[in-house]
Structures are given as C-alpha cells and as structure tokens.
Image (cartoon, rainbow, N blue to C red):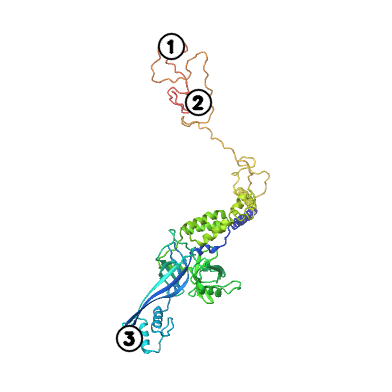
Amino acid sequence: MRRSGSALTLLGGLALAVAAMTPALAHEHPSGITDLVTPAVVRVEAKARVDITLLDHIGELVHVERSYEVPIGAGTGTVVTPDGAVVTLARVVRTDKDIAVYAANKIFAEHHKVKIPQDFERHTIKNDQLNHHLQECYPPKRPTATCIVDITTEIHVFPNISPPDKEGFKAEVVRADSRPDGPAVLMPVGRADGGAGLPTAPLAATVPDKEGSPVAVAGFTGRPAADLPETVDIAHLRAGGAGTGGRQFKDPENKVDEPAKLGALVDKGLIGGPVIEDKKGAVVGLLVGGGKDGRMIGVREISKALAEAKVAPRRGPIDAAFEQALTRFHTKYYGDAVPAFQRVLDLYPGHTVAAAHLKTAQQKRGTAEDEGVRKAAAPVGDGDGGGGPPLWPFLAAGGVLVVAVVVGALLLWRRRSPPGEGPAGNGHPGTTRSGDTRPGTAPVPIAGPPPALRRPPPDETADPTVVVSRSFPALPKTSSTSPGQPVLVARDPGAKPADPAAQRIPGAKTADTAAQKYCTACGMRLGPAHRFCGYCGHASET
C-alpha cells in the first residue's frame, strides 16, 4: 500500500505540472496595452468669459463696457461613458483666483491709461480719486460699486479624432472636489459625435499595491492635431496606499527620476491624464502634482466622484468592436484584423488608433508576418508551424499520465476489495491467485474476464401468460392423404352437436369427441376453453 500511495502521489504531482504548463503555453500578453485607453483621452480647456461695465462718473457719467476671456485651466481628461462623461481634475476646470479682480485691473488700465498689473491681485494707484473708484470696482458688489461684472465659465473638450476637431464640444461641471487635485466630472451640453457615442476607457477595480508595479501615463500637451498626437510614457508605482497627497512613483532600478519626469509632463498638459495599469490596460488613477513631484490619485476616488455625480461608467459598441480588432491585431492575424478595424471606423470614423492599426494590418496582411497565412501554409502535424514549442510531447505525456492513473486506481481498488468479490485469474468469481501463501494476508484476486451472465431458472409456478425460456415440441405434421382437412381446430364451447351427416364424412369426428387444439404461433397444446395460448399469448381463434 505504501508503494501504491507513493505512486499515486507522484502521478498527482505530474498531473499538476502538466496542467500548469498548458496555460503557460497558451497565454500570451500582447503589446500596446495603452490602446484600450488612448482613444478615450481628450484635451480639456476651461476659460471664464467676463462681461464688465465700468461706471466712470469723474466727469460726465460714462458707461465703459468690455468683454474678456480669462483662462482657468487646461489639461487632460478621460471619457468613461459613450455619451461623453469625462473625468479630470478640479483645478483643470476651476480656479481659486478672483477673475473679477483681474477684469477690474484690466478695464481701469485701459480706460484711464494708468499702469496697473493685469493679474488677480488688488492694487492701489497714486491718484486718490482714481484709486477710490478702483477700490469701488473690486468685489464684492456694493451699492456704490463702480463696476458691474458678469462671469460665466466655458469648458471645451477636444476628442482624440482625425481629422482634428478645432471647436470641440462644450461641457459643464456636474461634480468637482473641493481640493484642486481632486477629481471632477464633466457632462457634454453641446453636440455629440456619432450615433454610437464616443470611445471610452475601462476603469480598474483596484490599484496595484506591489512595489514597482509598471504603469503608463497618457495625455495631450495641446489640442489634438495631426502633428500633436497623444503623449505616452511609462512609470512605476511605489507600494502602499495613495493617501491624501497621492501615490508616488519610483523607478525600481533608480535609473530615472520618475517623480521629476512625470512632474514635467504634468506642467506640459498631462495634468489629470489617466494612469494605466500594465496587465489589463485599465485606468487605475489620474496624474496630479507638478514641478519635480508627479503623483497619482487612485481609481477609488474616481469611482466615488462618479457615484456622487450619479454617473455610471460603462463601455459602448465602439469599444466592443475595437477590442475584437485589437485581439486580432496584437496576435498578428492581420488578415482578420483588417475588416475588424474597418468595422470600428464605420461606427466612429475619427478613431485615430483604429485608423493607424488598419494601415499597418493592410501592409502586413498576406505576408510572412501574418499568422493566418503561416497557419494555412503549415503542413498538418508540423509541430513548428505555430511558431512555438511543439505540443505533441505534452499530448503524449498526458496520454501516458492518464493510462498510469487508470492502472494505479485499478490496482488500488483490487487491493481493497474483499476476497471472493473481484474477478479471479481463472475467470470465475471467488477464486484467488494460486501460490500466495503468505501468512496474515488476504488472497488477492487475479484479473480476468468478467463472468458471463446467466439466465435465472424458469419459474414453473409462474402465471400461464408469462413467457418462460424452454424448448417447444415440434409442430404436428399434416397428412398428405387428407387434403383440405384442418389440423388445428378451435372448437366453440357453445356450438351445437355436429350434423349427423358430418359423421358420414370420412375422417370426421363425432361431436362428443373433442379435437386436440394447438397454438398456431408456438405449437403448444391448447385447452378446450382456451382462447389464448398460455405460453406465447397468441389468440387461439386466429
């Protein structure tokens, strides 16, 4: 039993090894993991439109009207629903600076021809009368105010499409965090592109907590254009939670100062851009910080902001078609990728990533790099046709393993069987292996063919209508000298006595003499009043 247990343990280990090797051979991560997100990356620009009226009553009352556009912020956002919901940072669409102060400084400098810095700070001038009017122009609004100010915020979103959209579409803030580096949720208020909506980016469930987890960042340093595509770079996350200050970056090999590198990208326009995990290509956070300290806020804060804005992130038909095309493209089935990318462009003609991959797939379709061509050209049974290790050694090992497991299980079952129950060496139940005279051991049955099934003995006391297995007597023979005379007769018990004339017919029997009847189906004898055969059940009168 110890040997059998050791053998089964070894076989189990081999089974686990083969099962572990098979998925490793079948699974292969494609490149271009950011392709799922970059089509949904957008440029976000926010500005304030200020309409200000200066009431100049130093001499005659004069109304001076001006309109200014004051930049609030610019950065990167990510589309999370087909109808255009965008997540970005609050400081991209909101500012703590007083725009009314900026407008007051500018209109006073232009109208009164005085030197006042055009910034967001309150200033004084040497002329007491003008300085009094300037201070009355600054907010808050009072009954003696010399300025009437109306401020509206305009947010424009520029999608990643080709040809580029110079106008974009307008959006409004539906939820913004109180912190500048907190998430903000935008919803479009203008036109929508395409009946199928916009491409979206998938959101991850959690942030990788392992030290040095590889990620990628993406965004725009300006409005998307043919000569200004999205910027993509790689980074690595530090271990631990993000906290209120955001998750930090660090190169595991200390070759690159990643916080400074990402901080520079933030200052160029990637602020609020998506941070993309390496394995599944989903968004795990947004890029924050700046200067020499680029950081990340996690996807949990993004999900919380979306929930408070009552926006549910979801994918659309464009994303489903694009993922199918990407699978064919990154596995090098270029012939199949061409119609798949064409389907994406039918749904969303401006899809820049699909258009670029379509061009590459068309160039490589039908060439030696096309896996579809290589598979079709490879001879049947060629282990090297798939471009990887041959599978026949693993298939052979699997077959041997299955046979070994079956044999081991059979031996174990037979050793555990009580004497007289298993198949014996001579093919009869109850016999044991000859020559096994070891003391204290039970006789071991010898493998042999299973015993033949035997029919149960006939039940002589069974009901007459039950067919039993027995031999039947031969049918009675008809004499050739009496043509036309019936041999099998079924007499009616209620029939009248036979006509006396019938007794004069040669060979005829008298009425009081009962003729022996036989079954026409099986030949067995029938009783005088039997209407059915007691052996086969056949009707006696037919």
Cα distance between the residues tagged 1 and 2: 31 Å
Q: Quick one: label 3 or label 1, which is nearer the N terminus?
A: 3
Q: Which residue is mark 3?
A: 59
Rendered position, 443 above or below 536: below
Q: Is residue 73 left or right of residue 408?
A: left
Rendered position, 300 above or below 403: below
- Is residue 133 at least partly visible in the picture? yes
Q: Is residue 339 left or right of residue 84?
A: right
Q: Which mark is residue 503?
A: 1
- Give the x, y percent position of residue 356: 54, 61
**Element type at marker 2?**
loop
Classify the position of the C terminus by image quarter. Answer: top left
Q: Which residue is mark 2?
A: 522
- Give the x, y percent position of residue 336: 55, 53
Residue contact at pointers 1 and 2, CB within 8 angstroms? no
Between disc 1 and disc 2, the foreground one is 2
Q: Quick one: label 2 or label 3, which is nearer the N terminus?
A: 3
